[in-house]
Amino acid sequence: MVRIQTKRLLLRDHEPSDLEPYCKIESDPAYRWPEKVHPRAELERSFREAWLPPKVMGLLAAVFKPSGLYIGRCGLYPYRTDGGALVPNEASIAFYLSRRYWGRGLATEAGSALVAHAFGELGLSRIHAGVNADNMASIRVVEKLGFRYVRTGEGSGNRWHDFELVNPRWHTAA
């Protein structure tokens, strides 16, 4: 089921036929950097358990409309504090696109549609974005979308930046 549509993308629930392109994308070391590539069996399990079941809020399959190909996943998922507590009316945004589609403005296009969906249809108060501190392209995307820097942190050998975007209907000052 298509949930969100942009000029060049369909964001829909994952389907069984997305397994092969998902595994191919996830097996690209440059795409996975700075994380390691996981074994195929783990990717298949993750796909079946985490991505295939539809969710009210979660990452959706990203399909490039001109070719009809699965090119990754983008979406909103429930935001949790560092302690793991669910924060009502807030979400995290993410976009993971195949390296072949980097540099085309697709993450910004998807992100813009997701922000509109989050604040419009879902009525969320705030969206968070966690970005690897060395991923300048993703940092530019969230900045273009209007997110503001909140903090930098480290964990599991990675350094990351947190950004947030506040729904102007909920807050008059950020």
Image: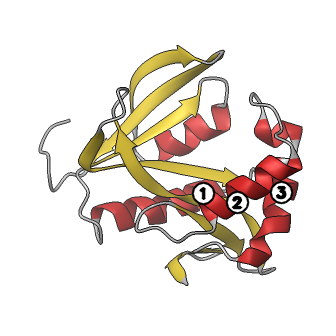
Comparing labels 3 and 2, the label whose residue is closer to the camera: 2
Where does the N terminus fall, quadrant-wise? bottom right
Alpha carbon separation for disc pair 1 and 2: 6 Å
Residue 21 lies in quadrant: bottom right
The amino acid on which the numbered mark 1 sits, given as a three-letter code, is Ala
Residue at point 45%, 56% (across, down): 76
| Crowd tier of the residue under label 3, counting other residues whose Cα lies within 10 Å: few below 14, some 14–19, many 20 or above | some
Residue bearing the label numbered 1: 50
Dot 1 or dot 3, earlier in sequence: 3
Q: Nearer the viewer, residue 159 or 171?
A: 159
View extreme (bottom): residue: 1
| Crowd tier of the residue under label 2, counting other residues whose Cα lies within 10 Å: few below 14, some 14–19, many 20 or above | many
Whether the residues at callouts 3 and 2 have beta carbons within 8 Å, the answer is: yes
Residue bearing the label numbered 2: 47
Residue at point 78%, 60% (across, down): 22
Q: Position of residue 39 (x, y in %)?
A: 86, 43
